[in-house]
Amino acid sequence: MNATQAQLLRWVLVETSHPGNVGSAARALKTMGFSDLHLISPKIAGVAETSEAIALASGAVDVLESSQETSSLESAVQGCTLVLGLTSRDREFGPPAFNWQAARPLVQAAIAANQQVALLFGPERTGLDNHHLSLCTHRVWLDANPLYPSLNLAQAIMVCAFTLRESLEEDLRLGHLGQHTETVDYADPAAVAAMLEHWREGLEAIGYLDPANPKKLMPRLQALFARTRLHKEEIDLLRGIAKQMLLKK
């Protein structure tokens, strides 16, 4: 695996509770050659600077020091054409779901096309919620004991980092990188979420969506658009439709 491949992988920890898990995650990432760590609304502000995180990082303090802490998950996934939300919990709606083995080729294809990829890991106790998943292109789970599928946060990160390193090194050996003649210009999930908000306003304006009784219309539309993997120009088209709906108000 080379540095360019590693830089295209963004590791996003959402609302992490325990500083030790942040430190252990940094250690796992550095061991496998990754470093782009994003911390979204950790329960302890400045968690990367805590003594417990530094102790558990065990030599990977540079990954902690370069980590980015923010309250905006949207900003963390901006520019990423592939966003994988790691959670084993089934959802009625949401993005397409794959196990990790099936999802890895998607990551490899995106990296080969020089596209940014984000992997999201949720809070230790509850995992990713529906809002978090609304900013993902896919929901992914790690195959585990069905009677006890729970992994520690750092363990899950290590499994993903180790297997991705294997896959990306194999791509280098086989010369798969740079072979893609056409790169699909996918919209990032933050742009899709903003478009959906525009549509919600437009559907309310024409009376199709009752804000007092929205039922499941928006989650269904969200799941529909997640399955299609919208292109950037399609976002512009859909926003144009929403704009026309708002003019009817």
Image (cartoon, rainbow, N blue to C red):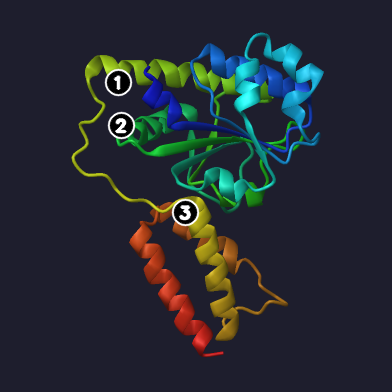
Q: Are marks 2 and 1 in contact (CB under 8 Å)?
A: yes
Residue pictured at 60% horizontal, 78% vertical: 209
Where disc 3 sits, the SS reads helix
Q: Could you tell which of marks 3 and 1 lies nearer the N-terminus?
A: 1
Disc 3 versus disc 2: nearer the observer: 2
Q: Is residue 227 above or below residue 35?
A: below
Q: Position of residue 222 (x, y in %)?
A: 53, 59
**Which residue reaches farthest bottom?**
248
Q: Amino acid at mark 2?
A: Ala
Q: Which residue is mark 1?
A: 171
- Report if residue 10 is visible in the image: yes
Quadrant of image for the C terminus: bottom right
Residue pictured at 59% horizontal, 23% vertical: 157
Q: Position of residue 50 (x, y in %)?
A: 79, 23
Q: Residues within 10 Å of mark 1 (few under 14, many from 20)?
A: some
Side of 118 where 105 appears, left or right: left
Q: Are marks 3 and 2 in contact (CB under 8 Å)?
A: no
Q: Are marks 3 and 1 in contact (CB under 8 Å)?
A: no
| Nearer-the-camera pick, 90 or 139 | 139
Looking at the rendering, which quadrant does residue 155 occupy? top right
| Nearer-the-camera pick, 207 or 121 | 121
Residue pictured at 78% horizontal, 31% vertical: 17
Q: Amino acid at mark 1?
A: Asp
Q: Could you tell which of marks 2 and 1 lies nearer the N-terminus?
A: 2
| Nearer-the-camera pick, 183 or 170 | 183
Q: Which residue is mark 2?
A: 112
Q: Could you tell which of marks 3 and 2 lies nearer the N-terminus?
A: 2
Q: Which residue is mark 3?
A: 226
Residue pictured at 75% horizontal, 36% vertical: 42
| Nearer-the-camera pick, 123 or 58 | 58
